[in-house]
Structures are given as C-alpha cells and as structure tokens.
Amino acid sequence: MSGASDVIIVGGGLMGSSAALFLRGHGLSVTLLETDLIGRQASGTNFGNVRRQGRGIHQLPLANRAIAIWRKSRELLGADVEYLQSGHIRVCYRERPELVGAMEDYAGKARLEGLDLELLSGNALRDKFPFFGPDVLAGSYSPTDGHANPRLAAPAFARAAQRLGAIVHENTKIIDAQKVGEDFIVTAADGRTFRAPILLVTAGAWGNALSSQFDEPVPIVPRGPNMSVTEPVPYAILPAVGVMTPVEEETVYFRQVARGNIVLGGSTRGPSFPDQYRAYVEPQNTLSQLKQIRRLAPQLGKLNIIRVWSGIEGYLPDSQPVMGPSATTSGLYYAFGFSGSGFQIGPGVGETMAEIIARGATDIPMAPYDIARFAQ
Amino acid sequence: MAEPRIIIVGAGPSGTRAAQACVAAGIRPIVIDEGRRDGGQIYRRQPDNFTRPYAKLYGTEAGRAQALHETFDALKGAIDYRPETLVWNIAAGQVWTASGTAQEAIPFDALLLCTGATDRLMPVKGWNYAGTYSLGGSQVALKSQAVSIGHKVVFMGSGPLLYLVASQYVEAGADVAAVLDTAPFSARLKALPDLLAMPSVLWNGVALTQTLKRAGVTVQHGVTPVEIIGDVESGVGGVRFRTASGREDTIACDAVAMGHHLRPETQLADLARCAFAFDPLTRQWLPERDGDGRASVAGVYLAGDGAKILGARSAEASGRLAALAALADLGLPVDKGETASLRGDVANYAKFARGLAQAFPWPAQQAAALPDDAILCRCEGVTAGNLRAVMRETGAKEANRAKAFSRVGMGRCQGRYCGLAAAELIAAEADMPVEQVGRLRGQAPVKPLTISIGDE
C-alpha cells in the first residue's frame, strides 16, 4: 500500500487540482494522481477563455462561483495565472440576422442569473471594437468576463493544494479502481496502490475508462482543440472575441495576451489519441481557422502564426459534463467530460465537488450533469 | 503503375544530389526549397546581378560549389522545382507548402528531408544587443550581399565555421578585431587521429588559420566569454572574456559573430513523427535513421546536415545515398555497388565529423554559468534567472514543461537558437544528465506562417 487518505482524486487537470485545493480547505486528506504531468492536456492546451456568456443558462450559477475564484486567484494560489478581466465579445454575421434575437433572449435570461451583457451593433460596435470585419453584424459584450493562461492555471492549483498538504503523484497511470469493503483501492501501472473511502474521477477524456469499471460507461469522444498563436504585437485588443454560429467551421475565437501574442482558436476540432497521449492539429484545420479569423478580423491577416497546438479533450453528446455522485457506487464521484468548455468553470467545479464530498450537498444545480442520463 | 511521387525538401548539396539520382532513375521529383536560389547555405548563390567569381565566393570549395550549381541548373527541366516555398507542416503522407499566400498539400510516396543546419548558439550575457549575429548569419551577409556585419568584428565561439567566416571576412577586406575560440588548442591534438580521415579538408582548415595569422588577427584558444558589452541604444561596443590563463580582457568592436559549430534542422522530421535518439558526443537529439538514411517512419528519408552534422561533402554523398534507398524501396533498380561505395564515403566523413566534434567541443558548462541577468531566450526575452526561478517554483525539469511555464523556446524560433543551451542550464540546475531534460517538441508551422495563407 503506497498511501491512504480521505479522498483519492484520479486526474490532475484543472478540475482535480482545484478539487484537491478546496478539499484541503474542508480538512480532508487528499491524494491526487496524474498519469503524466499536472494540467498537460485539455486543461493546459485550451484557449484560456474565462467566459460565462454563451454557456447554458443552467450553468451560470457554477460559472459565477468560478469567476469569484478567478478574481482572487493570485491571493488564493500565490501565483500569477495571467487572469485578465478584460471582457468578452461574442458576435454574429450578417448572413444570420436571426442570431441577434437569440443574443437578446440570452441576455435577458443571463441578467436574471447576475450576468449583465450589452448588445452592440453598427457604429457602436465598430467604435468600441474597430477590428471587426464587414461581415460582422452585431455583438454581445460581457465586460466582466476575460481570459487566463491555461498552461499555468492547473499546475498553480496543484501547487497550492500541495502547500496545504495534498499529496500529488505525477507520472502515475491508474489501471484499476475497485471498491473493497468501505474503501476504494486504486492501482497504478507500476503496481503502487492507493486507498481511500472516497474516489473522485476527474480524468477528462479518460474518465470513461474508470466509470466503466463501476458499470456506468459514458459515450465520451476524444477530440482536440485547434489552437494557434501569433508573434507578439503591441497590446491593443482587450476582450476575448468569439463568433456565435451554428456552423462548427465558423466557430473561431481570439484573445491577445498582455505580452502581445494573439491566441487563435476554433474552427474544426481535430481527433486526439488518449492511448498514445498525443493530439495533433490537422493542417487543413489550421487553414480553415485562419480563413475564418480573416473574416472575423481582417487586419489579423497581416500577422504570422508561430506555433499551433492541441491536446486531449473529452466530449459528451450533449456537451454537458458528467458531474456529481455515481449512480452505482457510494463514495464515488465524477467531474469529467467538459466537452471543450471546462476552463472557466474549472475552479468552480473543484469547489463544488469539494463541497458535495465534504458536506453532502451544494446549492449549485447539478441535475443536468447526472451520469445516470447515460444509463441504458 | 503511376510514376512514384518523390518530394525532396531542400536544394543544398544533399537535396541537389538526391534530385540528380531521382532524375537518373527516370523520376521527376518535386524539389521544394525556402531559398530564392539553389545551393543551400554553404553553397548559397549570390543574387542574379552580382558577378563575384566562384573563387572569391567559395575559396577552396569553389570547384565543388560550381559543380553543384551546374548540376542543379542542368536538372531544372527534369524536376518540379519550387523555390521560395516553405514546407510548414507534414501530415498523413502529405507535405503542406506555403509560398507567399499560396498554399498546397502535396502527397508523396517518398519524402527526402535535406533540410540543412543552423548555428548552434551558446548565449552570452549581452547577445541580445544589436550587432550580435550568428556565424552563419554573418557569412550570409558576406556571401549574398557582399557586406560585413560591422566595421570591427569579433568572432567568438568555436568550430570550423569560426575560422572559415573570419578568414572570409579578412579576405573581403573587413576589420577582424579577434577570433576567440572557446576550445582549448589541446582538444585539436586529441582529435587528430579522426581528423586525418580527410587530410585535404584538415589542410584547408590549417590554411585558414594561416590566413588569419598573415593578416595579423589575434587568435585565442580556450577563452571563456563573459559578456558582450553594449546598450540597447547603440548596440554592441565590445567583448569581455577570460583568457585561457584566467586573465580578464576586453576587445572593442561594433559587431560580434558567434556560434559553436552547427545543429541540424530536424523539425520536419519531428512533424513527420520520426523517432529521435540522443547523441552523447554532440549532446543533441537526432532523428534515427539507418545507414542509408531511412527514418523510423516508412517513406521518409533523412540526408545531409539536416540529419546529423557531417559537412557539405558528406551531404552530397548522403543525399545521393538516401535517394538510392528511396528508389530501391519503390522497387526501382539501383546499382548495389554504388550504394556500397557511398556508404564507405559517408563512414569516412562521419569519422572526420567526430574529430571536429572533439576538436571544437560544445561548452555546456557556459550555460550552467550563465548569470541570472543574461537573456537566455531572445525571442521571448526570458533571462537565465527567470528560468531558474520557474524551476525552483514549479519543479519543472523537462524541456517542454520548462517551456510551458517560462516561455523559453516558445517564440518564433521555437527554441532553435536557445533550446540546446536551455537544456544544459536545466540539466545543471537540476543536477541531472542533459538527455533526461528531453527535447523540445517541434510544432507547425516550422517557420512563421502568414494568417493570409490561402487568401485568393
């Protein structure tokens, strides 16, 4: 037996790392197990949007909880994760004027959840954001959203958890998990075992491998984000920018980091390979992304990209995560499958899961995330 | 059966000889090259309206340069030549090219990567000041544009290029303030048995040092660079260093050419998903290949300095050898006698290259000794102290992890300039062998790619 604790967390992404931190806040002992290094896949390779707008209305309470954590992240983590509350603007194109109505409808509902959005069009939009191309019709501006650096975030949460006494094992690939009596026994590929009465699975695209061991498989599909970054240019674009559209190829977004580089994301996502621990950007997806970026902000066509990347993300058919207690096994909890939109809510997920585990209840609505929705 | 599609990336010595072998076998290869003209770096051709003679441009290598250029000129009607074209990605049996805003995906049956080399650089405090060039860059300025990088130039580093470029500058009439070699002279004597594998090349090297001597240029061995003196406004003002006997000295200059021999351009092999192995002699990760140039990925072949630094003569032989391997794998008849003879040539060049690596060793200890305020990664402006602080705070010891947290190697060169030194610094700081630091994963695009790519 390599270790016993109150809680074992399998999966060292943003969800697992933040859950570890908040569980320590509740006084529970925690062992966090990660196959590779903390935050290397979906948590570390995503776009870095700290964006509430555009999420399902039912998810806004969780997103609001998360934004409070992002705002105090520097003090909480003792590290700078480059969080900027510099706004988020979501626009639609002239060929889809019906989306303006959808934006208005969303803004009305979001306001009831405490998220204030400003609808902009015509000169008001272009005076504020002169970089938009002629195809852009209107936008919904969220001044209190923003962005952060995904490469830094999850590792900073894990280090903060460690400072509070959490045990973190990287390079620990879990091959088996079973409940024996009152305890879960979790076994690593190298034979080490870990024991705890509570098991939290935050294993992203690998989550199904563990949930299946407890007879609740989920139809998760691994994919990878399509990311690029430009060379640095003078800092001028404050908000994160995205497109509202039903067409996947048109779904691009960009943000400028304070250092000056512009991070580009979106258009078609690529495949990813959890077994090989690799994800690749397909060249045609880079090209479609750049084409859509030129449409959204034509001036960016004068810049160069210097690097592309991807990572392994887990997608569920309804784009909602599996989150909450197991339907088959007491003491077992899940938070995975965030379907390409887990970064902003990540710290809120960690805090909420810690609350559910430590106190048995939360005010956050959890019904949409119930794993039982995939039961046969 | 349709004619197999062979793509050759690079039109230097190895790419040219590979193309020649393909054409001789009745194949019309596609030759993709970033340069405006063929010749690669070492045999770089001058712009169209320049008329300097071969002897002036290429010295002892004039005959080889001329032969190579004439070979390429004669091939032009028989190959699909695409100059000023970047292969920015490789995936699923296709190369992805960019030329201006035009782009294309070209499928291949065999891909020959003849991508050449760039300078291997060891950072020195102050190397970010304007007026600091790589040895290769200073040679390009002279060879292509007939200009010197400064009025008074110090050459600092080690390797054959240090002496070659310095003597080319002397012969062009430039003021060479000093040649400062970090390698002790004794290393050369130890390397002599291997260097004797190619007596004529060795003799050429000796002749270079005599050119410098005749011109009265100070040549020092076993120096330790301390600092490139200067400021942001006016650039380089001088070089401070410790002599072999430990005395500190300063030489005034307005430009520095620096480098420690070469490193292969392996990013395309990386994107083609070739396996890499650590080479302890040069302390670099190199793509694996068999004796004829076959990479670990079927249909991919590696030749010339882009696979391993063996020099221009070896590049001609290994380019031809890799092409013959590709042709044989495609089922075309190949002269086995020639293959065997080329293998022998390459083995001899490899012995000489081993001698060079011993004579001009990579001063890994300089990375460990880099002061905290020295810039390590020039693209991202990261100091040695930044990287050390990130390592202390996060525990990062792996190359890509350290990059993710510190930005070292994250800029437009993707670590081609600073990556080897950063790995040495990490290894020293973590007190572990440099091979355990790993290697930076290459990502597309290999060079910056315009967002206007594909714009009609």
Image: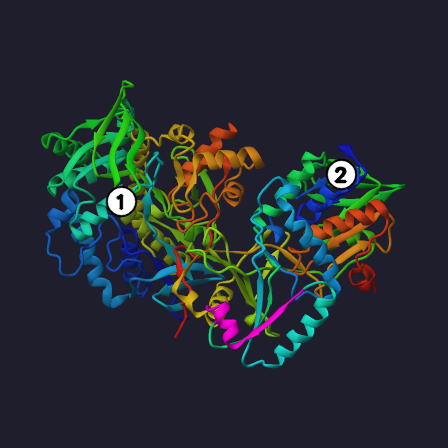
> Is A130 covered by the magenta stretch?
yes
| Side of A253 relative to B259 (left or right) | right
Q: Nearer the viewer, mark 1 or mark 2?
A: 2
Residue identified by numbered label 2? A30
Q: What secondary structure is found at the residue carrying circle 2?
A: strand
The amino acid type found where label 1 is placed reads Gly
Looking at the image, can residue B312 be seen?
no
Name the foreground residue: A134 vs A196.
A134
Residue B84 placed where, x, y %?
30, 62
Chain bearing tag 1 is B
Residue A128 drawn above or below residue B53: below
Q: Inspect the image, locate mark 2, and give the three-letter code of the amino acid beneath it.
A: Val
Q: Which residue is mark 1?
A: B136
Can residue B329 be seen?
yes
Would you say A238 lies left or right of A352 here?
left
- The residue depicted at 27 percent of the width and 61 percent of the height is B24
Locate the C terminus of chain A and report the quarter of the image it occupies: bottom right
The image quadrant that residue A369 belongs to is bottom right
The stretch in magenta equals A116-132
B424 left or right, relative to B171 = right
The front one of A147 and B274 is A147
Q: At 49% across and 33% down in the image, what residue appears?
A: B388
Chain bearing mark 2 = A
Helix, strand, or loop for circle 1?
helix
